Amino acid sequence: MRTKAILLSLLMATFSLAGCFGEDEVVSEPVVSEEPEDVRIFVTDKTGASIDVMPIEMAFQFSDVGETGKEPSIGITSSGCIFFIAMEKVMRSCDGGQAWEETQDPVQCSPTTSDPYGWVDPITDRVFGVQMIGLETSWICWSDDDGASWMGNPHDSGTTPLNDHIKLASGPWTDAGYGALGQFTSGFYETAVYYCYNKLAGIFCFTSFDGGATFETGGQIIGLATTNGGLHGAISTAPDGTVYVTPRVATPTVIVSKDNGFSWFERTMGTDVTTPNPRKNSEVSTDTDSNAYHIWTGADEGVYMSRSTDSGETWEQESIRISPAGVISTVFPQTDAGDPGRIAITYLGSENTEMMNQTDIDGNPWNGNAHYAPNNASYHLYITYSLNALDENPTFHTYRVTDDPVQRGSICLNSGDCRDIGGSNRNLLDFNDLHIDREGRVYVAFADGCTGDCATNPNASASDSRDGRGAVYYLASGPSLYVANGEMQPLY
């Protein structure tokens, strides 16, 4: 049962220190209860081991968007309006998730898509809705008034397919490369807007000088000669203008630009834990001092991190485990950061340790990879905070915020190799999302694959878990990721 509010009070009896192309589906109404049934809280060190530290006291509020929410993006404007973008719709809530409405313009924003993405510029409040039209063209629309009105333009990726994995972000101009050009050119938009997608040849990234209306400069970036290197995660930007793109590769890698996309270089890390196969994308977050945190799922299926304190030039090579040791399978890690060392991470995870080495979906011993999870494995949504992530020995406070599974059974991590057990297990597609607002409050967007009878039946299995309903959790009370803002209070 997905609860309306997960009020995770620190009751000693309830927490444990131990431990792109989708199918249409009927979105069922959720079954709601008023209290969580199984609160799970972990406090762990950089190895994932439990430590004797009191958890940060936090509460998370749930909101049902009411629409299909596969591959959701989330952003929050300075007015407090939440934008949730998934499939063909831009959904908006300006009352803390109590009510949602569709807000996009069907003329200025394309009504059809195969691969949507959304972004809210944290500096200018411009809201972007990006849609993929066929395999060669995208449609980018934007709003400067919280979705009351929209403008839009197509972006043609040329005659060489594919135009896939579309991503958009924005960040400050630098004093080098394209940023230096802006010092001598009038009419530049306040922020640089970046648009990336993959073709068969690899990752292509472009920079817009006019706020995303056109993208005239850019092209193929480096780091593409490895398997799946053309598939990439979200674009991340830092306050000093550094830009990060993460390719989907065996060795955790970031592709970095310090001149607004004019040139790029590549850095690797995580050779001690690598990544699984099949795999999904990693992500980078940056704090107010432009320290960078690269988050990914390691080959042992835990969530790991590497840090850079020099704007992506160098990265520590000893990986830090973020997920608790008892969470033996993870997928879709997303992250954002506030002040130095204050970060939040979300992911889907399973604690079904009893199923390790039992028969997986292919009849082999299961090693924790979500792609092969047994039919009765359960995946939940986890949110992790660290307020000292730059320390030599950081502490991670992890809440399992869902009391019924987000998915039962396997999660397809390779679109060319999905399992059809009562319907395709690609119902969640490729990613979730996490962003903070200007107060430092954390918001998580995810697709709920287990609703209705799946959520209430303890014997439900993979064939019952084929939904993809859009949902949000946000921090109702607890520490802001910005020190100056102290403790967050409920929005309503």
Image (tube, rainbow, N blue to C red):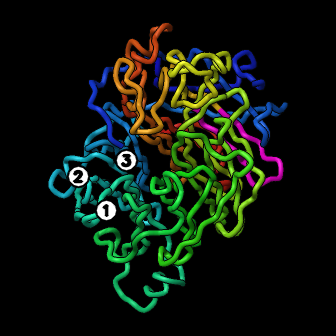
The answer to whether residue 440 of the structure is visible from this angle is no
Q: Disc 2 versus disc 1: distance between alpha carbons?
A: 27 Å
**In the rendered image of this protein, does residue 137 appear above or below residue 86?**
below
Instruction: Please give the residue where the numbered disc 3 appears in the rendered image.
Output: 83
Task: Residue 347: name its quadrant.
Answer: top right
Q: Disc 3 versus disc 2: distance between alpha carbons?
A: 24 Å
Q: Secondary structure at mark 3?
A: strand
**In the rendered image of this protein, does residue 373 appear above or below residue 203?**
above
Q: Secondary structure at mark 2?
A: loop
Crowd tier of the residue under label 1, counting other residues whose Cα lies within 10 Å: few below 14, some 14–19, many 20 or above: some
- Which of the numbered marks, if any, corresponds to residue 329? none
Name the spot of residue 6 as percent of width and height, x first. 55, 26
Q: Nearer the viewer, mark 2 or mark 1?
A: 2
**In the rendered image of this protein, does residue 321 appear above or below residue 401?**
below
- Give, as a three-letter code, the residue at label 2: Gly
Instruction: Please give the residue where the numbered disc 1 appears in the rendered image.
Output: 144
**In the rendered image of this protein, does residue 441 appear above or below residue 18?**
below
Of pointers 3 and 2, the one earlier in the residue sequence: 3
Of residues 272 and 6, which is closer to you in this image? Answer: 272
Of pointers 2 and 1, the one earlier in the residue sequence: 2
- Which of the numbered marks, if any, corresponds to residue 134? 2
The span shown in magenta is 382-398
- Mark 2 near mark 1, Cβ–Cβ under 8 Å? no
- Give, as a three-letter code, the residue at label 3: Phe
